[in-house]
Amino acid sequence: MTAPSYWRERKYRYRLIAKYCRNCDKKYYPPRLVCLRCGNDKLEEVELPRKGTLITYTWVTQPPNEFAAYAPYAIGLIKLDDGTLIFAQLTDVDYEELREGLRVEAVFRKNV
Amino acid sequence: MNEVYITGIGLTKVSEHWNKSLKHLTYESVQNCLKDCNYKKPDLIVVSNALGGFIQYQESLSNLIAENLSLNKIPNLRIETGEASGASALMVGYMAIASGMFKNVLIIGVEKISDALPHQFISYVSSFLDYEYFVYNGITPASIFAILYKLYLKRYNAKQENIAQFASHDHKMAINVEHAQYRFNLPVERILSSPILVDPIRLFESYPVSDGAASIMLSSKDQVENKDYSVKLEMISASTDVNVLYREDMLLFASLRDSFSQIRKHAKIELKDIDFLEIYDPYTIASPIILESLGLLNKGEGYKLLLEGQHEKDGDLPLNTHGGLKARGHPIGATTLYQVCESVLQLRDKAYNQVPNAYIGLVHSMNNIGDQSFLILLKRL
Ligand SMILES: [Zn+2]
């Protein structure tokens, strides 16, 4: 991914900022510019909760080139505490310890 | 709107073609196609290719292919909609004939994956997703299918051995198919003891690395010479869905459900009218979800007809009679054209696993996890 693209998206990624449609009470993460239900293009920016529950998870042994150095790694489908679904990598946990319903929280990890 | 016919098809064997380039592969399939349609002269070329820009660093591919085939002085273009590129190319060709603007349109699907290193290839196919948010987090299409797989097993209390059976089915079909990549039996026990690719997806539940090219000549009615060989391209329907995270139900491809309602509405075709079905099954878990989204089976029962043997060539609804994505192979931009060529063979009574009395065939194609769905309806003349 190019440097300007990291820079452009940094707020949304690092602070988990979603787009929110007040008409539909619906949050979009990844952020979208128009509500996919009602077409409203005046979406607000809202910070998502940083805690959630693991719905399910998998173990990536065939990574894309960008993550070749980190494989194998776990990714999870997470329901944040406001109900928003996100995919994220799971860190600081062994694969054997993962289970559905596990409480998780968003943290920063440095790419080495 | 003018009617659209398929007057010629041409294939190459799906394989890892180390000694052939995009040019060689397309040349071979187009020569077969031109011979098959008794050397019609195309007035438009539509190329389907998803990854040539990434893997071969080749853009403007359609013009290069046209020059290499000496099909000059006619328009050419390349279509890309990820894994569904072939279906989109066919749709563009359909529009070109239906509008009356062109009489013979040559559709060429080609992909050469073996030129890429494995991790690079995963990056490239992952680019079909929203790169800035999915790939950035290490999410790949395979990992999303893996998550759907786990959700499916849990919600419906299903057994993996029943889902894996779809790969076994594909392989059994491919044994007779000359152009298929992997022509051997693969019992479920072997699939389930193969290495884990992305938990719970086993290696043999996934599509392989494939190179291939397939070509189709689309023609207007006045160009049809041989009625026994030509097939009517009755309709192509297409629909889309939001990405999986926004969906109400991750285990349903709403875009496919919509595509089939269009077929039902405009072509007046019901599932019971279809003599055989080709589905786009990159991973085994895709198959039951596709069959359920089509409305063929209830949710959670997508493998029921498979276990009853109804997807065999003489069953109620023959499925992937030439091996599907796992055994025929999955040269991405060419895959849907292979599916359609194989269906044409069925409707000509020349298939490798011939379905008795095959008059109507339905081909399904999709991009990502049903983000885009296509259905292609074919009829014998
Ligand atoms: Zn809205």
Image: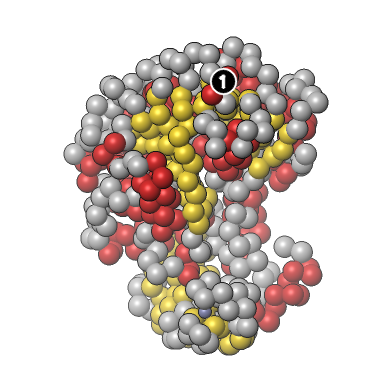
Secondary structure at badge 1 equals helix
In the picture, residue B69 is in which quadrant?
top right
Q: Residue at x 71, y 46 (%)?
A: B54
Q: Residue at x 40, y 29 (%)?
A: B379
In the picture, residue A104 is in which quadrant?
bottom left
B93 above or below B144?
Answer: above
The one nearer the camera, B365 or B161, is B365
Q: On the rendered structure, is B363 left or right of B57? A: left
Q: Position of residue B310 (x, y in %)?
A: 23, 36
Please indicate, yes or no, whether residue B101 appears anywhere in the rendered image.
Answer: yes
Q: Which amino acid is tagged 1?
A: Asp
Q: Where does label 1 land, which residue?
A: B222
Q: Residue furthest front?
A: B1
Query: Mark 1 falls within which chain?
Result: B
Q: Position of residue B9 (x, y in %)?
A: 54, 22
The one nearer the camera, B47 or B218, is B218
Render colour scheme: secondary structure
Q: Position of residue B1 (x, y in %)?
A: 55, 37
Q: Residue at x 67, y 23 (%)?
A: B42
B202 above or below A100?
Answer: above
In the picture, residue A102 is in which quadrant?
bottom left
